[in-house]
Image: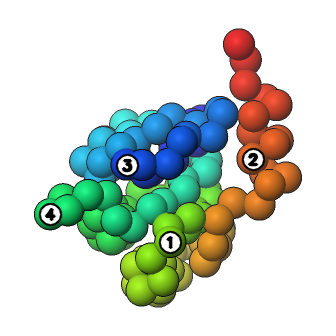
């Protein structure tokens, strides 16, 4: 099981695969079982954004176990949260904010070098 961090600008946390585009993120979600997914909204001018990833998740019904929204876009975060929360299976955790530091540390410590 993998962890995916979608962001075109920020540094990827240790223990995560770095998806720099919506397309790359959707491919990882399609091909792999994902535990933690952390989403940014804005991914570059004129490019697909985090909401496109959310639409892909909902359409395919392939949900990660835990989804966090680390974007600095308040409106983007709200749109993604509302769409995910309305459609998610009961066992999926959706958090309207970034991953807690304790979770980041736990994942980083479990990395096999």
Residue named by callout 4: 46
User: Are the residues at dot 1 and dot 4 in contact (C-beta closer than 8 Å)?
Assistant: no
Q: Could you tell me how far apart the alpha carbons at marks 2 and 1 are, in whole angstroms?
A: 18 Å
**Counting residues from the N terminus, which is met first, the one under dot 1 or under dot 4?**
4
Residue named by callout 2: 104
**Counting residues from the N terminus, which is met first, the one under dot 2 or under dot 1?**
1
Residue 47: x %, y % from top left:
18, 59
Residue named by callout 1: 72
Label 4: how many Cα within 10 Å (few below 14, some 14–19, many 20+): few
Q: What residue is shown at x 66% (from left), y 34% (from top)? A: 14
Q: Quadrant of the N terminus?
A: top right
Q: What residue is shown at x 77% (from left), y 60% (from top)? A: 100
Residue 82: x %, y % from top left:
47, 86
Q: Could you tell me how far apart the alpha carbons at marks 2 and 4 are, in whole angstroms?
A: 31 Å
Where disc 3 sits, the SS reads loop
Which dot, 2 or 3, sits closer to the camera?
3
Q: Could you tell me how far apart the alpha carbons at marks 3 and 4 are, in whole angstroms?
A: 13 Å
Where disc 2 sits, the SS reads helix
**Counting residues from the N terminus, which is met first, the one under dot 3 or under dot 4?**
3
Residue 32, above or below 104: above
Where disc 4 sits, the SS reads loop
Residue 89: x %, y % from top left:
54, 72
Q: Could you tell me how far apart the alpha carbons at marks 1 and 4 are, in whole angstroms?
A: 18 Å
Closer to the camera in the image, 110 or 104:
104
**Counting residues from the N terminus, which is met first, the one under dot 1 or under dot 3?**
3
């Amino acid at each position: 099981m993998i962890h995916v961090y979608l962001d075109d600008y920020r540094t990827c946390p240790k223990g995560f695969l770095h998806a720099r585009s919506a397309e790359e993120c959707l491919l990882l979600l399609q091909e792999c079982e994902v535990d933690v997914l952390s989403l940014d909204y804005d991914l570059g001018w004129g490019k697909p954004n985090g909401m496109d990833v959310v639409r892909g998740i909902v359409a395919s019904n392939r949900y990660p176990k835990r989804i966090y929204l680390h974007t600095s876009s308040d409106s983007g975060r709200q749109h993604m949260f509302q769409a995910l929360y309305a459609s998610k299976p009961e066992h999926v955790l959706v958090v309207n904010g970034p991953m807690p530091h304790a979770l980041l540390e736990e994942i980083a410590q479990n990395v096999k070098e």
